[in-house]
Image (cartoon, rainbow, N blue to C red):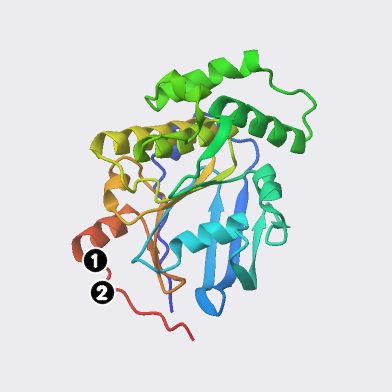
Amino acid sequence: MNITMNKPATNQAKKISSHERPTKVDVLEICDLHANIGKLKILNGINLTIRSCEIHAIMGPNGSGKSTLCNVLMGHPKYEVVKGSAKFNGKEILELDPNERANLGLFLGFQHPLEIAGVSMGNFLRLARNLNLKAAGETKQISPMEFMPMLKETVGLLKMDEKFISRSVNEGFSGGEKKRAEIVQMAVLKPKIAMLDEIDSGLDIDALKIVAEGIVETFKKTGLGVLLITHYQRLLNYITPDFVHVMAKGKIIQSGDKKLALELEKHGYEKFPKVDNR
């Protein structure tokens, strides 16, 4: 099946000034990726390349494998990779532990963020950031005095009360607060490639705009690559993707730009070709 790939829309990449652009282009290259859960086939040959300063959106019906793709790339143990590769800057990641993948610069924002009782968000993020720096060969660690102003600024960007910094991670947070906390983590940890799994689900209009602004601001500051998993075009009213991909039955069946998302919103998925799982 031919896949149509339009030229990327570059409006957001142009917003990144020259001094903010990454000096090195990071590349996540997924080639013919197949994955199962038990005997059930879920991914059936994913081919996708995500680079620095690119925003990709994957849309598709329920059960098409969108969330599975993120979980497989991040190393969730319940999924079995049966074929294919995923290389980050030329390094195969599928045999690495999740922590090793995170230390390389991969980040997953969860659809249903977990609560971590007894660990404050501030301590959790400073420890995670220092572990990433150590893995990158940095000898200097960030002290609490250095870290706190940066964290407060980021929390403010997401319009969260500073009291959340001292609260246990996600414990007692509302659904919208949990999603905002995921973007705070992304902004603080400064990954090279961020996968955001239905970060817009369950958000009201105001919360959606705040979360989207946090994603765009982090993108502008760092030039990271972003993979957005979403069901709805509404998120893309605030974030203009360079590429939109339609996924069905574990495969990407069509790719384009934002116009493709508008077409999906208008016509749904009925017009797209079906994919044989066999």
Check the image and name the residue furthest to the left. Answer: 266
Helix, strand or loop for disc 2: loop
Q: Residue 16: image x %, image y %? A: 48, 32
- Disc 1 residue type (three-letter): Gly
219 or 15: nearer the viewer: 219
Q: Considering only vertical position in the picture, is 258 above or below 134? A: below
CB-based contact (under 8 Å), mark 1 and mark 2: yes
Q: Residue at x 43, y 75 (%)?
A: 2
Determine crowd level at label 1: few under 14, some 14-19, many 20+ residues with C-alpha closer than 10 A: few
Label placed on residue 24: none
Q: Considering only vertical position in the picture, is 200 above or below 158? A: below
Q: Residue at x 42, y 55 (%)?
A: 7
Report the Cα–Cα distance between label 1 and label 2: 7 Å
Give the residue pinned by disc 2. 271
Instruction: Tell whether 74 sits left or right of 275.
Output: right
Instruction: Tell whether 26 sits left or right of 17.
Output: right
Q: Quadrant of residue 173?
A: top left
Give the residue pinned by disc 1. 268
Q: Residue at x 65, y 40 (%)?
A: 24
Question: Which mark's residue is nearer the viewer, 1 or 2?
Answer: 1
Q: Residue 77: image x %, image y %? A: 63, 61
Q: Residue 209: image x %, image y %? A: 30, 35
10 or 40: nearer the viewer: 40
Q: Residue 98: image x %, image y %? A: 66, 51
Q: How many marks?
A: 2
- Disc 2 residue type (three-letter): Lys
Q: Considering only vertical position in the picture, is 3 above or below 111? A: below
197 or 49: nearer the viewer: 197
Q: Could you tell me if residue 223 is visible in this image?
A: no
Check the image and name the residue furthest to the front. Answer: 118
